[in-house]
Image (cartoon, rainbow, N blue to C red):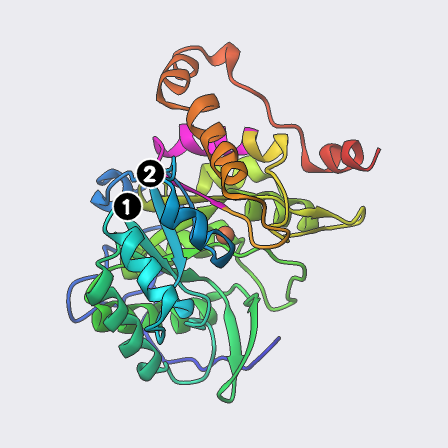
Amino acid sequence: MPCRLPSPGKPVTATGALVVAGEHGYAAEMSSRTTPMTSTPRMGLPHLGYGVGLRTPHFGYLLQNQAQVDWFEIISENFMDSRGRPRAVLNHIAERYPIVMHGVSLSIGSTDPLDFDYLRRLKQLADEIHPAWISDHLCWTGVAGLNNHDLLPLPLNDDTLQHVAQRVIAVQDFLERPLILENPSSYVTFAASTLPEWEFLSELTAATGCGLLLDVNNVYVSSVNHEFDPLEYLQKIPADRVVQFHLAGHTNCGTHLIDTHDGPVIDPVWQLYHRAKERTGGCATLLEWDARIPEFPVMEAEINKARETFGVGRLDQSETDETHRPSVPHPAVLVTAEVE
Ligand SMILES: [Fe+2]
């Protein structure tokens, strides 16, 4: 375990569901772990279409050209304290496209106190650029005031659930909006874990009213590394809480996969993405490409595969015909195929 989690003593029901509430009403109804929720798709947030991350190597291109994407995601920390060229480029983009703020330092799972100076600066940026929503990761990124800049996994059990839920509610109350949390890719599990990730996320959304950023590549990477069924993961997450997808490339190390964001999306992840769209009805989709970043037109072409290959028309057609739905082979089979 990375750290010892406190037990704040919040009541828990017989099913394990938390009884917690936020000051501003972002806590949701209690739920059983097996009871599907039925509410507004995407929590009522807009389907932004197909976007890419705003990255420094593309600044010059984006100032000179009209990007053929629907929206941009920014790494919040890259712009929170910037008043120079990065902010000028962001302002240029924000005047033309919807923006989503995606953070990497909230450290929602840490046992450190929440960093309200960080949250104040995050909220300040949001007040200035008006993002469609603010997201971060289900992880911890440091302890004792140190940031190690990694998205570290959590032991998934009831103690962690109570701890994280209380912090999510505090963050949502401060930001005055729902927090959207992303499933991380992971490479280790904990002896102290008692809940599968999909169950942890389901309970967390029910207890706090937060949303989900479903990284389809992360589901695939973790499913291979931990040998679970990615389709079961998709089937058991609360579909109406998913407001965004991530797509990305990863590195196959033979014995395990690493979420490197350094190449195109592989076919099995596209297939899983198709299933995720069927499961949720579709939502804003973002291509992540953070190493060996190609020219912007390559990014455009890759994200527009999501639009063209798995767009609304194609999806509607497949949804009416069970026999034409693509099957997703078990990840172990796919890894073998990739190694070969
Ligand atoms: Fe992601």
* Labels 1 & 2 near each other (Cβ < 8 A): yes
At label 2, the amino acid type is Asp
Which residue is found at the position 34% from the left and 30% from the top?
281
Tell whether circle 1 marks a residue whose Cβ is less than 8 angstroms from ligand 1: no
Residue bearing the label numbered 2: 70
Residue 292 placement (x, y as % from top left): 64, 51
The mark nearer the N terminus, 1 or 2, is 2
Q: Hey, which residue is sitting farthest bottom in the picture?
A: 144
At label 1, the amino acid type is Tyr
Task: Tell whether position 279 is magenta.
Answer: yes
Distance between the alpha carbons at the discs numbered 1 and 2:
7 Å
Q: In which quarter of the image is the C terminus?
A: top right
Residue 16 placement (x, y as % from top left): 39, 60
Which residue is found at the position 41% from the left and 70% from the top?
77
> In this view of the protein, which residue sits in the foreground, 13 or 104?
104
For residue 235, side relative to residue 81 (left or right): right
Disc on res. 108: none
Q: Hey, which residue is sitting farthest left in the picture?
A: 24
Q: Is residue 16 visible?
A: no
Residue bearing the label numbered 1: 97
Instruction: Give the magenta-colored segment's residue range.
Output: 271-287
Q: Is residue 279 above or below residue 25?
A: above
Residue 44 placement (x, y as % from top left): 21, 43
> In this view of the protein, which residue sits in the foreground, 38 or 290?
290
Q: Is residue 202 visible?
A: yes
For residue 60, side relative to residue 89 (left or right): right
Q: In which quarter of the image is the N terminus?
A: bottom right
Secondary structure under tag 1 reads loop
